[in-house]
């Protein structure tokens, strides 16, 4: 399967803005297949003006409908982050149980960065893998 644009991708697209209610957008992939032309229309008759623009600039265009963005609330994001931290903690506890002593750096000193926590857990996994299979059972 090719990642290159299809001929249909090079047609202009007219659609309702997914974030700003009442705005309309015209977008078109340029001939290089990598850059885009974008025009945004707001206010009275935004849709009609977007269509006139697309017709004038590109002649061939499609009016399409896209689903609005589904934004998470701050409470939803906080709940998801809390769940992710709980999952990392559960993984850490399992790795600490199987890894040789002191092979997993102490979480108290790592700070709240998930990447540092993941790196500590990976060190523990490497220590477990380095042990002989007989020592794990």
Image: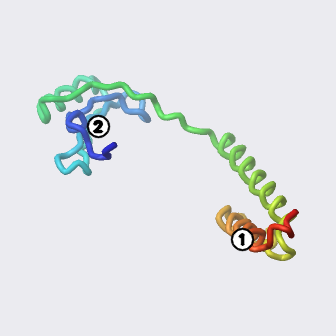
- Quarter of the picture containing the C terminus is bottom right
Asked whether residue 109 appears in the rendered view, the answer is no
The image quarter containing residue 122 is bottom right
Viewed as shown, does residue 58 lie left or right of 96? left
Compared with 137, 17 (above or below) is above
Between disc 2 and disc 1, the foreground one is 1
- Which residue is depicted at the point 78% across and 52% down? 86
Compared with 48, 114 (above or below) is below
The image quarter containing residue 47 is top left
- Which residue is depicted at the point 84% across and 60% down? 93
Q: Position of residue 125 (x, y in %)?
A: 74, 67
Residue count near mark 2 (Cα–Cα under 10 Å), binned few <14, some 14–19, many ≥20: some
* Contact (Cβ within 8 Å) of mark 2 with mark 1: no
How is the rendered protein coloured? Answer: rainbow
Q: Position of residue 91 (x, y in %)?
A: 78, 57
Mark 2–mark 1 Cα distance, whole angstroms, equals 52 Å
Viewed as shown, does residue 32 lie left or right of 81? left
Disc 1 designates what residue? 126
Disc 2 designates what residue? 40
Label located before the other in sequence (2 or 1): 2
Q: Secondary structure at mark 1?
A: helix
The image quarter containing residue 28 is top left
Q: Position of residue 6 (x, y in %)?
A: 24, 38
């Amino acid at each position: 399967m090719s990642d290159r644009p299809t001929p249909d991708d090079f047609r202009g697209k007219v659609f309702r803005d997914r974030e700003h209610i009442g705005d309309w957008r015209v977008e078109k992939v340029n001939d290089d297949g990598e850059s885009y032309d974008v025009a945004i229309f707001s206010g009275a008759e935004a849709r009609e003006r977007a269509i006139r623009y697309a017709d004038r600039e590109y002649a061939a265009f499609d009016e399409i409908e896209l689903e609005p963005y589904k934004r998470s609330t701050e409470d939803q994001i906080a709940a998801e982050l809390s769940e992710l931290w709980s999952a990392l903690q559960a993984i850490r506890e399992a790795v600490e149980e199987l890894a040789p002593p002191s092979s997993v750096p102490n979480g108290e000193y790592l700070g709240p960065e998930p990447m540092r926590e993941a790196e500590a857990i990976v060190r523990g996994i490497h220590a477990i893998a380095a042990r002989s299979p007989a020592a794990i059972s």
